[in-house]
Image: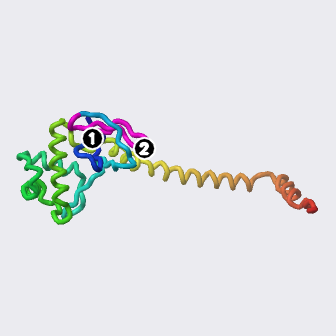
């Protein structure tokens, strides 16, 4: 199971693996009880775990960074029903978190999600295709820069060839341009 396929769904507890998406919803599998079901996008919103960010005292960080810090901490997870214990845990595990803007309900949810991920042996990391796309984007401008001068020289050559063209063609163009226009009825 890949971290990139995991979603949180509003109104439903726990995490889900996205199996297939449709125009009006998605087919998901619960990580808790392994049940598969269709969830309508008209009623629920889907949030990929990869896209969730957490407020910190500096720049926002991805949820993956927080989960990795929780994993490195290695301590016992607090009871997700005790808000004070959860806050103390995060003060120790990730002290840069902005505790004024991150609600205790969100911290409780992060503890629940982390325990679900650990129980299902999910490797917590961002997907690699994003890195490949960034490399491709970084390489793409170089060929474009090389092509532009080539096009300019092609236009210059075309202009030079047009000037060197036989003068017999130019009077023919002028004659065609001086032909009388048809009268309108």
Query: Which one is in front, 41 or 115?
Result: 41
Image: 99 above or below 146: below
Left or right of 185, for residue 138: left
Is residue 22 one of those drawn in magenta? yes
Left or right of 49, for residue 184: right
Query: Which one is in front, 173 or 164?
Result: 173
Is residue 185 one of those drawn in magenta? no
- Could you say which disc has been placed on residue 16 in the image? 1
Span colored in magenta: 17-33
Query: Which one is in front, 173 or 44?
Result: 44
Residue 95 image point, x, y percent: 12, 59
Main secondary-structure element of the magenta-colored stretch: strand
Quarter of the image that includes the N terminus: top left
Left or right of 166, for residue 15: left
**Disc 2 element:** loop
Image: 11 above or below 55: above
Q: Residue at x 91, y 59 (%)?
A: 179
Residue 129 image point, x, y percent: 34, 42
Which one is closest to the eye, mark 2 or mark 1? 2
Which residue is identified by label 2?
A: 24
Tell me where residue 160 sits by quadrant.
bottom right
Image: 161 above or below 58: above
Determine crowd level at label 2: few under 14, some 14-19, many 20+ residues with C-alpha closer than 10 A: few
Q: Residue at x 86, y 57 (%)?
A: 171
Q: Earlier in the sequence, mark 2 or mark 1?
A: 1
Residue 135 image point, x, y percent: 36, 46
Determine crowd level at label 1: few under 14, some 14-19, many 20+ residues with C-alpha closer than 10 A: many
For the residues labelled 2 and 1, the Cα–Cα distance comes to 17 Å
Residue 149 image point, x, y percent: 54, 54
Is any part of residue 49 visible from this angle?
Answer: no
Quarter of the image that includes the C terminus: bottom right
């Amino acid at each position: 199971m890949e971290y990139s396929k995991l979603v949180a769904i509003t109104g439903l507890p726990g995490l889900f693996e996205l199996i297939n998406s449709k125009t009006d919803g998605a087919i998901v599998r619960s990580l808790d009880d392994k049940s598969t079901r269709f969830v309508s996008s008209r009623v629920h919103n889907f949030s990929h775990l990869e896209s969730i960010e957490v407020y910190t005292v500096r720049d926002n960080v991805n949820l993956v960074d927080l989960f990795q810090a929780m994993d490195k901490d290695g301590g016992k997870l607090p009871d997700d029903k005790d808000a004070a214990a959860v806050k103390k845990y995060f003060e120790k595990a990730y002290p840069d978190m902005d505790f004024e803007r991150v609600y205790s309900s969100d911290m409780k949810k992060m503890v629940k999600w982390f325990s679900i991920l650990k129980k299902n042996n999910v490797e917590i990391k961002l997907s690699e295709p994003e890195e490949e796309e960034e490399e491709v984007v970084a390489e793409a401008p170089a060929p474009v820069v090389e092509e532009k001068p080539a096009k300019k020289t092609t236009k210059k050559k075309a202009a030079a060839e047009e000037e060197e063209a036989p003068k017999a063609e130019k009077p023919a163009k002028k004659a065609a341009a001086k032909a009388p226009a048809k009268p309108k009825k």
